[in-house]
Every structure is written in structure tokens, then in C-alpha cells.
Image: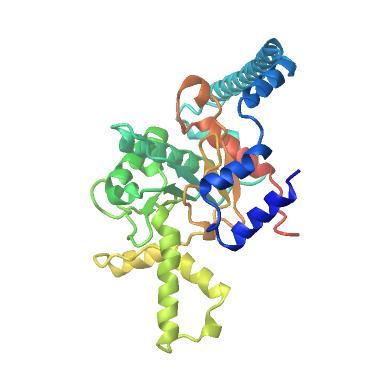
Amino acid sequence: MVSQRDRELLRSDVRARGVKLSAADRESLLKPYLPDPSDLPRRQNQQRKNAPRKTPIRSFLKSQLYQLTYTLIHIFFGITVRLIQTYHAVVDRIFAIVYYHHRTPELIQKDVKGLKRIPEHLSVILTLRKEDDALVVLMDEVAELAAWSACSGIPVLSIYEKSGVLKSCIPTLHQVITSKLSSYYGSPSQQPTLQLFAPHHPVYNVSENGTSTNKPNSRPLTILLLSSTDGRETFVDLTKTLAEMSQNGKLSPEDITMELVDAEISEITTHPLQSAASTTADSQAHASVISLKPEPDLLLVFGPFLKLDGYPPWHIRLTEMFCTGDKNHGATGYGEVVEYQGFIRGLWHYAGAQMRFGR
């Protein structure tokens, strides 16, 4: 307890702002009321001696138990995942053997004969690999899909590849597809009429001798090439165009409706650009033949995940999507593979899907 005398001295020094007492005087005044420094370590040592001793063996056993449980869970799920991958790999190989087409249109037609419906417009998402021959492999995949679609009676096939590399080599791609169709159908007279184009590109429809193909008895096969530029950039360009027309008084804001936007986007993405070198008869023939359904009925993705990868979203509002779920790539080391059994399973899925359309 501080004495009355010391309390008054400290208060008077505080009121005088530390002028009456020096630092040594204040220290000597407070020293009797402070504990002896020599007693502090002794008290800490006594508290340490009196504290209960920890048991590190229990902590060690707990950590080992947790690690063992964690390892067992990983082993269990690892084995489960591998078994599932192996199962899918075996099933895929069985389907690949049982439903192999042998490049025979009759066998493919037999596989799709019992289906309730066939898509009028099939769209496929492909990926350009990083190998040296990636473009050659990509073209061969497009050619295989074109042959399968023609044999199945699908009139329109759209191929989406994000970078748009296929648009820069349309003549070469046309030759590859024609060669693939020859291996399926034989003579050119038995092959379907092939029409290949991309948005903002004219229709490429020529035979090997450079003349326009004309096969009235064969069903035409139209292939549309899409890329990421046909999605977001198309929307941006259309928005700019409509805004400029509205500002210049050529178009009223009330006239910009959903139907107008839908029609304009369909005109841009699914109608070819007429070539200036083509004749009037050819242009009329192309205009009559190229009448695509804007929205694909079925969107097929070859891979373990349903990844749209920038696919133009406007025309897949009511599209049935199917992922082949090629799980065996994780077990065998292969990537996304375009195989006939995945193609036919996609058609099976579409035939059995329920089309409610919001009802």
C-alpha cells in the first residue's frame, strides 16, 4: 500500500510536470513497492516444476494414426478409380470390336436402322493436339466423322475447332474428306455430294477435275467449320453494327428484337459467302442447297469431360449434348480419341433422349 506522503510527492511532481523530482528520486520513491528482481526467476522455475509434464508419445501416436487413416483412404479411392477406368477401357474395347464398321456403309446403316430419330444437324467439338502431325490427325478425324455422318443419313455436320486452323486449309480438307469417302463408297458416282464452307467463306464444292459436282441421285453432305471467332466476336460485331444503325437512324431501337438478333446470327454463322467468281447458276444452286438448321440437334464431345471450349453459345440453346466419357485415357495414356463406338453411342443417346422443350 502506497503511503500518503509518497502519494502526495508523486502527485505534486506530476502537477509540476516532473520538475520537482528527478529520475533518480522517482526511482528511489517507487523502489520499495516493486518486487525483488532476484525472486522472479526463482518463481518461474517453481512454476515450471509444478506444471504437469506433457506426454509426447500420445501426440506421436495420434499423428501416426491420422497418417495411416489418410493413407488407407487414398489407397481405397485410388484402387476404386483404377477399377472404374479399367472397366470403361474394357467396355470401350468391346464396343469398338463389336460395332466396327469395316468402312462399309451398309454396316453403319444397320447400326442406326433401329433408332427412333437421327439428328439432322450434328456438331462435334475437336481439339488440335500438340504433336507435329496434329493438323493431319485433325483432318483425318474430320474425314472419318464426315463418312460416318454420310452413312448414317445425317445431312449436316458442323466441326468446331477453337483456333480455326481448318478454315485456312479448306481445299486440302476437301481432298482428304473426298479420299475418305472413296474408301467407304468406292466410285465417285456413289459418293454423296460434299459441300464444305465456313462463316464468311464461300462454298467449296468442286470435284477432282475442278468442275462443280452434280449428283442429283445422291444425298448431299454439308460440312460447316466453326471456331471461337464465330462466337463472342460475332456477337460483338453484330452489336456494334446494330448500335451504329440505330445511331444513324437506319434502325429503330424498338425493332431490335430477339427474332432479329437470331436471324442475323443465323445469317452470319450458317450461310456461306457467295464467291464473286461463281456463276449465277452455281450461286442459285448453292443457295438452294445450303439451307442449314441453325441449332445442332446433337453436340458430340470426344473426351472425359463436357468442355465447350468457347463454342458459339447462341445456337445450342436446345441442343442435346453428349460426352463420350473416354475414361480409359487416364489408364492407357491416350488423349481424346475419335472412335466410331463413341459416335454411335452419341446417336443412341440422342435417340433415347426426351425432347420436352420446356413443357
Q: Position of residue 258 (x, y in %)?
A: 57, 73
- Number of marks in the rendered image: 0
Is 71 left, or right, of 143 in this rendering? right
Position of residue 67 relative to residue 309, above or below, is above
Is 243 left, or right, of 187 in this rendering? right
Q: Quadrant of residue 269?
A: bottom left
Position of residue 359 relative to residue 253, above or below, is above
Q: For the point 40% across and 41% down, which residue is it? A: 142
- Most extreme residue toward the top is 57
The N terminus: image quadrant: top right
- Most extreme residue toward the front is 5
Q: For the point 35% across and 50% down, which residue is it? A: 164
Q: Nearer the viewer, residue 311 or 78?
A: 78
Q: Nearer the viewer, residue 18 or 42?
A: 18
Q: Position of residue 303 (x, y in %)?
A: 51, 35
Q: Quadrant of residue 33?
A: top right
Position of residue 263 relative to residue 89, above or below, is below
Q: Which color scheme is applied?
A: rainbow
Q: Position of residue 166 (x, y in %)?
A: 33, 47
Q: Is residue 159 visible?
A: yes
Q: Nearer the viewer, residue 272 or 46?
A: 46
Q: Position of residue 232 (x, y in %)?
A: 44, 60
The C terminus: image quadrant: bottom right
Q: For the point 30% across and 70% down, which residue is it? A: 280
Q: Is residue 290 visible?
A: no
